[in-house]
Image (cartoon, rainbow, N blue to C red):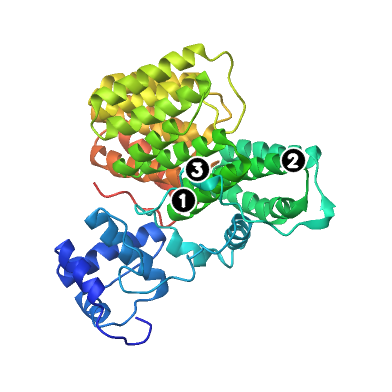
């Protein structure tokens, strides 16, 4: 506990009363969020009593307390609303987009400062998403360096670096590549955004910067730094708005929906998917399939069967109309569509069809997408086991393990944890026992602290 004693925190007391929590329940709700922010919390009822009497919790814990209340009450609870006052570390209203980019990227690229990002590693259900009309008018006038001028070649260099880092991310995972992406944001992209340029080149550079922010956020999500990913995504939205780039704006909203549905924040996932679809004017067939596939998944998770199947049909029709596979960031291909069909079918209760579609996606997916292959093989095995196909599940998991050590990904680690806990009860089976022993050995090589997920 840290901070000075103040008058009783009546605002927090009112929120606790509205939540219907005892002090013990309040403390437990906050403690449960600790792992999401890479924090180990052991608050008890006495800690809550101190907060209510006016003692400020440590700064890194305040966002978690607010998030616990937000999730309980179903509306955003800020630090001010909770009686803690503003949070300087996260109050960026007075900063322009480039300043935010530099501050966030600098902390992310430096291993000695990464621990300070823990408090924003927590996914926020209260995050305010700027609408397209808002971000197009919010770019502050930047001080231009008259000694540096950028041209088409500089834009192309940024685009090429983003494409190359994206390819490396697909092969090796976000944890391995994100420090490089953050360093490039700070050391190269930020100075370019301050450089002299024609209006056309400036817009192109802003668009390229937005793409790169989106990619860096995706890498953070892959590492399970979900709050940090949200911060990068917000920057990508702002930069896309400044560039007048609807494509990257909608791609980012869609990426935020992917994150939310993956974390089972269903209402957020559906809201973001709908926003992405609404904000995409004159979308081409591949972009339409890209957005509709995610919208279908979010709707299915929300239990809206009609909407899910309607959006899925839209995605399938649009994919049929697409002439060739795009190589752009966020591209959508037939394997991606079959994955979404699988997710929709699973959410709607059709496990067998989900397995069939996941297997189609596996066979269509290019070999370069190693991280995706690891994740989706794990998911395929889990679903085979659900319908009682133990030996087939073991084979899929063995295939997953073939590539696992080549990827550094928090989401892949999740699949390994789930596999260990799922297969352990079948130790009497030779196939399951051999798999479990192999997986334990691999887990110790990568993460000595890795433990099976509790079932």
Residue 152 position in % (x across, y down): 79, 37
Residue 224 position in % (x across, y down): 44, 50
Question: Residue 326 appears in which quarter of the rendering?
Answer: top right
The residue where tag 2 is placed is 201
Disc nearer the start of the sequence (1/3) = 3
Residue occupying the point 25% across, 81% down: 50
Q: Which mark is residue 133?
A: 3
Q: Residue furthest right?
A: 147
Total numbered labels placed on residues in the image: 3
**CB within 8 Å, label 3 to label 2:** no
The residue where tag 1 is placed is 230
Residue 333 position in % (x across, y down): 51, 22
Q: Is residue 152 visible?
A: yes
Label 1: which secondary element: helix
Identify whether 10 is placed above or below 327.
below
Label 2: which secondary element: helix
Q: Residues within 10 Å of mark 3 (few under 14, many from 20)?
A: few
Residue occupying the point 60% across, 41% down: 211
């Amino acid at each position: 506990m840290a901070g000075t004693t103040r008058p009783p925190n009546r605002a927090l007391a009112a929120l606790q009363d509205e939540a219907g929590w005892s002090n013990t329940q309040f403390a437990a709700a906050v403690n449960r969020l600790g792992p999401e922010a890479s924090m180990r919390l052991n608050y008890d009822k006495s800690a809550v009593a101190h907060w209510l009497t006016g003692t400020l919790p440590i700064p890194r814990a305040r966002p978690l307390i607010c998030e616990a209340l937000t999730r309980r009450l179903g509306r955003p609870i800020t630090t001010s609303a909770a009686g803690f006052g503003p949070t300087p570390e996260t109050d960026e209203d007075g900063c322009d987009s480039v300043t935010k980019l530099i501050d966030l990227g600098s902390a992310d690229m430096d291993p000695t400062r990464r621990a300070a990002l823990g408090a924003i590693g927590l996914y926020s259900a209260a995050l305010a998403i700027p609408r397209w009309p808002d971000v197009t008018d919010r770019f502050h006038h930047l001080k231009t360096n008259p000694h540096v001028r950028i041209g088409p070649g500089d834009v192309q260099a940024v685009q090429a670096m983003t494409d190359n880092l994206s390819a490396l991310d697909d092969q090796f995972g976000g944890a391995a590549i994100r420090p490089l992406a953050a360093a490039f944001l700070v050391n190269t992209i930020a100075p370019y955004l301050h450089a002299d340029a024609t209006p056309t080149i400036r817009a192109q550079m802003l668009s390229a910067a937005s793409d790169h922010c989106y990619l860096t956020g995706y890498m953070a999500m892959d590492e399970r730094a979900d709050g940090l990913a949200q911060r990068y995504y917000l920057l990508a939205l702002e930069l896309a708005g400044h560039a007048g780039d609807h494509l990257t704006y909608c791609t980012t909203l869609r990426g935020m929906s992917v994150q939310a549905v993956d974390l089972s924040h269903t209402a957020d996932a559906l809201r973001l998917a709908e926003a992405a679809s609404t904000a995409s004017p004159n979308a081409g067939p591949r972009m339409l399939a890209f957005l509709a596939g995610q919208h279908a998944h979010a709707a299915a998770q929300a239990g809206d069967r009609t909407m899910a199947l309607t959006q899925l049909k839209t995605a399938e029709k649009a994919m049929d109309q697409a002439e060739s596979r795009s190589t752009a960031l966020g591209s959508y291909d037939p394997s991606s569509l079959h994955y979404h069909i699988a997710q929709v079918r699973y959410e709607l209760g059709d496990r067998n069809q989900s397995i069939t579609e996941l297997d189609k996606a596996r066979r269509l997916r290019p070999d370069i997408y190693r991280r995706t292959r690891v994740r989706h093989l794990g998911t395929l095995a889990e679903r085979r086991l659900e319908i009682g196909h133990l030996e087939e599940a073991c084979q899929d998991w063995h295939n997953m393990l073939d590539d696992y050590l080549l990827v550094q990904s928090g989401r892949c680690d999740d699949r390994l944890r789930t596999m260990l806990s799922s297969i352990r009860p079948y130790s009497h089976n030779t196939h399951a026992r051999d798999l479990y022993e192999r997986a334990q050995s691999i887990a110790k090589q990568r993460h000595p602290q890795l433990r099976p997920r509790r079932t």
